[in-house]
Image (cartoon, helix red, strand yellow):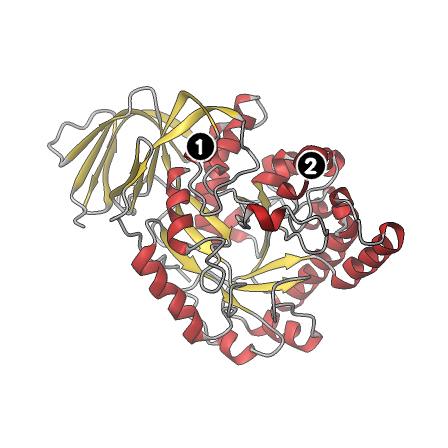
Amino acid sequence: MAKGSILIKGGTIVNRGKRTEGDLLIRDGIIERVGEAIDVAADREIDATGCYVLPGIIDDQVHFREPGLTHKATIGSEARAAVAGGTTSFMEMPNVVPATLTQLLLEEKYRIGAATSVANYSFYMGAANDNLDEALRTDPKRVCGLKIFMGSSTGNMLVDNEKTLDALFSRSPLLIATHCEDEATIRQNAAAARERYGTEIPVWEHPNIRSAEGCLLSSSLAIELAQRHNTRLHILHISTADEVSLFRNDIPLKDKRITAEVCVHHLTFNADDYTRLGNRIKCNPAIKSEHHRSALLPALLDDHFDVIATDHAPHTASEKAQADYFKAPGGLPLVQHSLDMMMRLEQAGHITLEKIVEKMCHAPAICYQVAGRGYLDTGLHADVVIYDPQETWTVAPENILYHVGWSPLEGMTLRGRVRETIVSGRLAYANGRVIDEVRGERLAFDR
C-alpha cells in the first residue's frame, strides 16, 4: 500500500513540551513540514480543527500472546486495538508458547509482525537460566531489549540462577528490561494465605501475596547488578511507593543507565477496586493500596519514573472468572485505552497533556533509542494521532477491539477520543474503523 502524502490542517500540535496551532505535512512516510499554515496539494487532507495532533504512542510493554496462546490474542488483533487507541509502535514480550528464547523463534515473531501488524513492532528476546548464548547473540540495532523475569512467570522464563543473572547483566549488548518480584517472598506469602483461607483465597489478598516487600527486594537486586556492571537497565511496571527512591531524577533521561516505567492501571486503580472488579484487575505486580497508587503519579511527574506503558496482557473472560485464586491468571487488556486513561487524569488536573506526550511518546523513544520516532519533527517517521478532546463515549463490548472482547473500563463514560491514527505515513485508523490492509514497520534502534 503506497504511502503518498497527507496534509493535516488546523490542529493543535503537541510536541516537545509546547502547543502550536498549525498544519503538518507527511510525504512518503516522513514528516516533511510542520508549520502555521501549509498550502500544498496532498493525496489526502485531514481537517484537525478543534483536535490535538500528537506523536504516536510507543508502548514498551505488551503481551500479544502469539504464538501459542492465540485464543487470548494475536499480534494482528491487538495491533488493531493499539492503533484505535493511538499506539503506533509496540514492544512485545517473550512469554508465549514456545517462549521466545532462541534467535529462530524471535525471527518467527518478526515474520508474523510483518505479515499481520497494522502498528510498528519490535519483540523482546527472552532470557532463561539455560539460554545465555542465544540471548547474547541478539542484535541491539534490530531488537528492543532482553526481557528478564526476576519473579514468577510463564514456563521456563524465571531467571533465578545467580551466575546467569550476573552474566546477562555484565555481557548483554541490549537494554535489559526486568519484571521484578522476589519469588521466595511470593511463595512464602502464598503459603500463609493457603493456611489462612484454604482453597478459597479472595482476590483482594493478591497485593498481600505479591507484596510491596517482594517488589522492593527484586528491584533492589536488579539495580545492584546494573550498578555493578554499568548495565542499561529498565525496570518495568513499578507499583509501590517503596521503590520510588531507587531511581534518580537529577540527570536527563538520555544520561540515565537505570530507568523505570509505570503503567496506566497502577495509576488508575487501587486495592479497593478488587471488591468491584475482582479478577478483572488481577495482575502482576499487583494493584496495591491507595498509599502506593497515590505515590506513583508524583514520581512520574518529578521524573523518578520515565515511561508510561500498559503491560497489556489479555486473558479470556472465562479464564479470569475462575474462582480458584491460583488458577485465575494475572493480566488485563489495556492497549486500546491507555491514552483515554491518562486523559482522565489530565481532565482532573493531575497531569498536563504535554507531560503525557513526554512520557508516552518522547521518553520511550529516548529510553530505547528508537530510530526516527517519538516526535512530530521534520525528517522523522510519520506516526501521528489526531485526538478529539470533545467527543464523549462509553466503553462497551461493541467498541472494544481486543480479541478477548472485554475491558476493566466497561461502562465508563469518557470525554475525548482518538479520531485518526497514522502509522509510518499511512492512515491506519479513522472514525472508528481500522484500515486492515495497512502494515506497520519493524522498529530500528540507534545503539
* Dot 2 alpha-carbon crowd within 10 angstroms: few under 14, some 14 to 19, many 20 or more: many
- At horizontal 18% and vertical 28% (from top left) the residue drawn is 38
Which is in the foreground here, disc 1 or disc 2?
Answer: 2
On the image, the x and y values in percent for residue 322 come to 66, 49
Amino acid type indicated by mark 1:
Gly
- Distance between the alpha carbons at the discs numbered 1 and 2: 26 Å
Which badge, 1 or 2, is on the more N-terminal residue?
1
**Does residue 331 appear in the picture of this structure?**
no
Question: Residue 320: in sight, yes or no?
Answer: yes
Dot 1: few (<14), some (14–19), or many (≥20) neighbours within 10 Å?
few
Residue 203 quadrant:
top right
Q: Which residue is mark 1?
A: 17
Q: Element at badge 2?
A: helix
In the foreground, 328 or 429: 328
Q: Amino acid at mark 2?
A: Arg
Along the viewing direction, whichever of 286 and 136 lies nearer the viewer? 286
Q: Nearer the viewer, residue 349 or 341?
A: 341
Above or below residue 447? Residue 27 is above
Mark drawn on residue 189:
none
Coordinates of residue 4 in the picture (x, y in percent): 15, 44
Q: Quadrant of residue 5?
A: top left
Q: Which residue is mark 2?
A: 293
